[in-house]
Image (cartoon, rainbow, N blue to C red):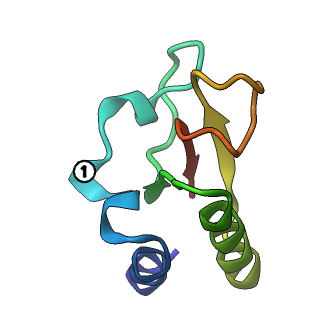
Amino acid sequence: MSDGFIDELRNALGQNSVLSGAAIDARYHHDLAGNPAPRPRAVVCPKTTEDVSALLRLCHRAKVPVISDCIMSTRPRSATSSKSWFTT
């Protein structure tokens, strides 16, 4: 994934919705069992279902893989939670 693609995500979703580099904190560097995991190039925190749709459309077009997760949602693994994030 290029820096240009990360910029495109920021333009579509807002600067504060896309984390990269040092802005990605340690919780994203481990899997749910606490084992080290490869560091993501970006973490996206969508605020609306429209943001989720835009994110997935852009990633599909660019063939960028997406891993979704969420916390504190009434629907487990739901992309509609305000506490959802996506790593790419």
- Point out the residue furthest to the top here: 33
Residue 81 visible somewhere in the drawing:
yes
- When the figure is inspected, residue 7 is found, relative to residue 48, above or below; the finding is below
Q: Amino acid at mark 1?
A: Ala
Give the answer, above or below, for where 56 lies relative to 37: below
Q: How many marks do you count on the picture?
A: 1
Does residue 62 sit above or below 45 in this rendering? below
In screen coordinates, is 84 left or right of 15? Answer: right
> In which quadrant of the rendered view does residue 55 lie?
bottom right
Question: Can you say which quadrant of the picture contains the C terminus?
Answer: bottom right
- Coordinates of residue 24 in the picture (x, y in percent): 32, 46
Describe the element under mark 1 as helix, strand or loop.
Answer: helix
Q: Is residue 27 left or right of residue 77?
A: left
Residue drawn at x 46%, y 80% as measured from the top left: 2
Depth check: give the residue in front, 71 or 30. 71
Q: Is residue 20 left or right of residue 37?
A: left
Residue 29, x across and y down, in percent: 42, 34
Instruction: Name the image quarter holding residue 10.
Output: bottom left
Q: Does the image show residue 18?
A: no
Residue drawn 31% across the image and 60% down it: 16
The residue positioned 38% from the left and 71% from the top of the image is 14
Residue on which the image places disc 1: 23
Where is 31 relative to 17, above or below? above
**Dot 1, crowdedness within 10 Å: few (<14), some or many (≥20)?**
few
